[in-house]
Amino acid sequence: MTTRTIEGTPVFDGAAAQRGYALNAMCFSFNDPANRAAFVADEREYCRKFGLTPEQRSAVERRDIPGLIAAGGNIYYLAKLAGILGLSVQDIGALQTGLSVDQFKAKLLAHAEAM
Amino acid sequence: MATILGGIFCSHVPGIGGAIAKGLQRDPYWKPFFDGFDPVHRWLDHARPTTAIVFYNDHGLNFFLDKMPTFAVGAAPDYRNADEGWGLAVSPPFAGEPELSWHVIEALVEAEFDVTTCQQMLVDHALTIPFALAWPGATRWPVRIVPIAINTVQHPLPSPKRCLALGRAVNAALRSWKGGDRILVMGTGGLSHQLDGGRAGHINVPYDRFCMDSLAGDPDAMTTQSSLDVVELAGTQGVEILNWIAARGALGARATELSRTYHIPISNTAAAVMLLEAHDAMQPA
């Protein structure tokens, strides 16, 4: 497993991949529109079916993106859940950095101005 | 005998697909990026490739964490795109070239790259968006493909050095291919970006410039770091530069930069388009 830490940067390694397996499996299932509809119809039942841990179920319920990542969620799979929830990657960025979405977008644009 | 023509290196942000669907190519936010393809289109008209070797990474359409190959080579007669879960229109399918795929696979394993082979393989936005950019509006793609997927999702990732060596081994395979293919190499993804964590929104202009400056003339300069070093520099998703590094290796020893576009931001990403022409592609890398 990775022992190195990079500030503010989750490294999706073997430990995370094991911890997050059920959550990521659920998100992978969202490639199928019928599964997205089933999640929307009954979130709790859908999470139960995939065997999410209590921590993962709670993070899904609370739309807690940092919590989902801490519980082993990989951002590429979580993006499929975010799509159902109507969250863009800027929304996700804002939720993780404590900025408003407009502030987060402004921060991205500021990189261009620094060029 | 096959000819290696050159390489297209570009970002594959899903938002680009959304912008194409909405016809936003001339919108001020998007125009600088889409304009980067004008020289690519002119070059493609002249180069007339028949075959594309595409280095990319899957984002959870074809591969899940149950089986995660470090290097996977497509060997299918055709490749489909499919619903990725967040609304991007499904791309037209791609024709494969299984004989060339198996030739590449045999050469790679002979060179001690023990790759995974895929006779069925869905290809995601990391492959379809660069095609939609290279051949806008196409309903049938003008090239057959050999897709090569590199794991940039689950650590440990292959090192930049190993990815360049993989690309060079692909170059050697192409040089020994008896077919008359006119070959385009593509490397997709990057440049710096990070979607997750407290550092979400990370962009590193000096590192991106270093990569773009090194790509044609000194790709080995990008291989002195580990993959985790690259994550620290370029971000958790910026590590997709591994696809560019491998693709550069496949071009052969010498390449000339024909065009470059670098534009910030597209979505959360420092986006780039580069076009390289291959030289001495038939000489050992």
Image (cartoon, grey):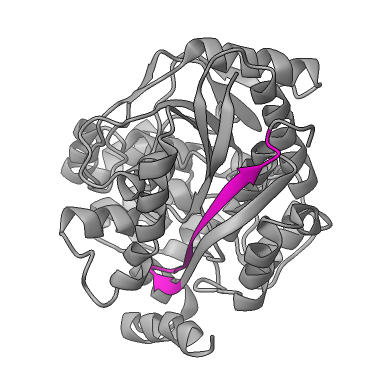
Please state which of residues B104 and A96 is positioned toward the viewer in this rendering. Answer: B104
- For the C terminus of chain B, the image quarter is top right
Residue range in magenta is B263-281
Relative placement, left or right, of B157 versus B271 is right
Please state which of residues A95 and B154 is positioned toward the viewer in this rendering. Answer: B154
At x 68% / y 73%, what residue is drawn?
A7
- For the N terminus of chain B, the image quarter is top right
User: How far across and how far down the image is residue B53, in percent?
Assistant: 53, 32
- Please say whether residue B270 is one of the residues in the magenta stretch: yes
Judge whether residue A52 can be spotted in this image.
Answer: no
User: How far across and how far down the image is residue B137, in percent?
Assistant: 20, 44
Q: How many marks?
A: 0
The rendered magenta stretch, by its main secondary structure, is classed as strand
Please state which of residues B206 and B159 is positioned toward the viewer in this rendering. Answer: B206
Q: Is residue A14 above or below residue A6?
A: above
User: How far across and how far down the image is residue B212, in percent?
Assistant: 62, 64
Q: Is residue B82 above or below residue B33?
A: above
- Please say whether residue B10 is one of the residues in the magenta stretch: no
At x 28% / y 52%, what residue is drawn?
B17
Q: Is residue A81 above or below residue B1?
A: below
At x 55% / y 74%, what residue is drawn?
B203
